[in-house]
Amino acid sequence: MKFESYWLDTVPAIKGLATGEVEGRADVIVIGGGLTGLSAALSLVKFGADVVVLEAGRMIGEASGRNGGQCNTGLLQDYLEVVKQYGEERARGFYTTFCAAVDTVERVVREERIDCDFARVGKLKLAAKPEHVEKLALTFDMLRNSVDPDVRLLSQSDLGNEIDSDIFHGGLLQPGSASLHVGRFGAGLAEASLKRGARLFESTPVTGIKRESGGGFRVTTHRGTLQAKYVLVATGCTTNGGPFGWIRRRIVPVGSFIIVTEPLTPDAMDALLPKRRNYVTTMNIGNYFRPTSDNRLLFGGRARFAMSNKKSDAKSGRILGDMMSQVFPQLRETEIDYCWGGLVDMTQDRFPRAGERNGMHYSMGYSGHGVQMSVHMGQAMADAMNGRPELNPWKDLRWPAIPGHFGPPWFLPFVGAYYRVKDRLS
Ligand SMILES: Cc1cc2nc3c(=O)[nH]c(=O)nc-3n(C[C@H](O)[C@H](O)[C@H](O)COP(=O)(O)OP(=O)(O)OC[C@H]3O[C@@H](n4cnc5c(N)ncnc54)[C@H](O)[C@@H]3O)c2cc1C
């Protein structure tokens, strides 16, 4: 078994990355080479800007290259709850923003001809308990009448055509959702901006940012300093250090883990998941899964409320293997080829945050729904720097610090215990 991301292991190295000193001037410095940063870089070079991306590790080496590859329409949160909290008009706005974000990814794939298996397969949310069916039905009614006429409610017998597992009780289908190979997509984004002149540095953590008296910023790395008129902070969980304490008090890094099986035969995958969709379950501590284009099953979840590291990933992988066998007993003997973990950038209300603070732009906090939103927001932040801040869909959300949270999230085991009890009772 390889303890690394299947996506990163199956993508060729990005050619043309910058080497040498970080020095001189640029129009924009993007901090973070995940999908947010790379999408912003591509939009900015298309506007004619001179762009430098500074990445602490490897391009798309963190969440952007370690996720489930689900590019879903709709909200992470239950739509009914969001309507209750924000009113229908705002909830509709949030929902359609996520749908627009999937369109954004599709447009980039098409325009840049990125070979990444993008396909509108649909997302099926599976009721893990009989009691969850009624809730799905209420959400379905609300969604169909309010915002998404294409959504479908599937009965337990309908699931016979969808999945070879008898543990689910019904499902909610959002047909506009897509799947893709995030490694090849991310590398394609990087190469599209390199082709247009962006300079992309790996292994270059930013250690300091200073506002200059005459305007603009001076950004420090161990490879030198660079000046620019604009800075975009696209650092996801920001656990790599750097001068981002303000963000670290607002984002909670939560470990999520994934295993990928050996390739099944095409016939076996046709029997298991004939429609080859994205799947999630209704539990708070639930699972997500999908086939890959080479007929492996990718199976993920918050196996434990732990941070990701090699030892932790291996333990989480064993737990996920057991969970996968509960859903698909026929895979009990199937080999697991990959196991890895990553950190999800959660906000308290699980909505993204983006805007400008002390003259610096930022976008993050996609809370596990970021494959599409990071790409969309990279473009929106490029628009903001180009004089169109009103195109940022999250600009009106306040972002107070999380009380008691200053760095590593000491409270996660308690949150995990709370949701486990909730899952048992609901
Ligand atoms: C296991 C897992 C499964 C997921 N599954 C899905 C899914 O199926 N669908 C979905 O929509 N979303 C999913 N997500 C979430 C999604 O992957 C993220 O929301 C998205 O990739 C965030 O992109 P980003 O560019 O903002 O952040 P990141 O990809 O985290 O990139 C931020 C980058 O900033 C760099 N950085 C940090 N500090 C510094 C510094 N000081 N100097 C320089 N660089 C720095 C980091 O090294 C990192 O590469 C998942 C996440 C995980 C971890």
Image (tube, rainbow, N blue to C red):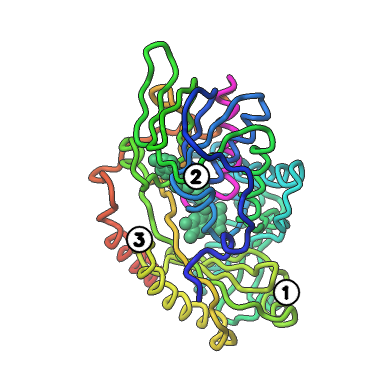
Label 3: how many residues lie within 10 Å, few (<14), some (14-19) or many (20+)?
many
Residue that lies at the very extreme toward the top in this rendered image: 214
Residue that lies at the very extreme toward the left in this rendered image: 404
Between disc 2 and disc 1, the foreground one is: 2
For the point 54% across and 87% down, the residue is: 332
Residue 96 in the figure: left or right of residue 420: right
Secondary element at image label 3:
loop
Picture coordinates of residue 167, whole percent (x, y): 55, 80
Picture coordinates of residue 350, whole percent (x, y): 44, 47
Give me the disc on residue 274: 1
Q: Which residue is mark 3?
A: 307
Q: Which residue is mark 2?
A: 202
Q: For the magenta stretch, what is the residue range?
A: 366-388
Kindly report the distance in space between the C-alpha atoms of the residues bearing marks 3 and 1. 34 Å
Residue type, label 2:
Glu
Q: Is residue 416 visible?
A: yes
Residue type, label 1:
Pro
Vertical order, 399 against 9 (above or below): above
Labels 3 and 1: the sequence-earlier one: 1
Give me the disc on residue 297: none
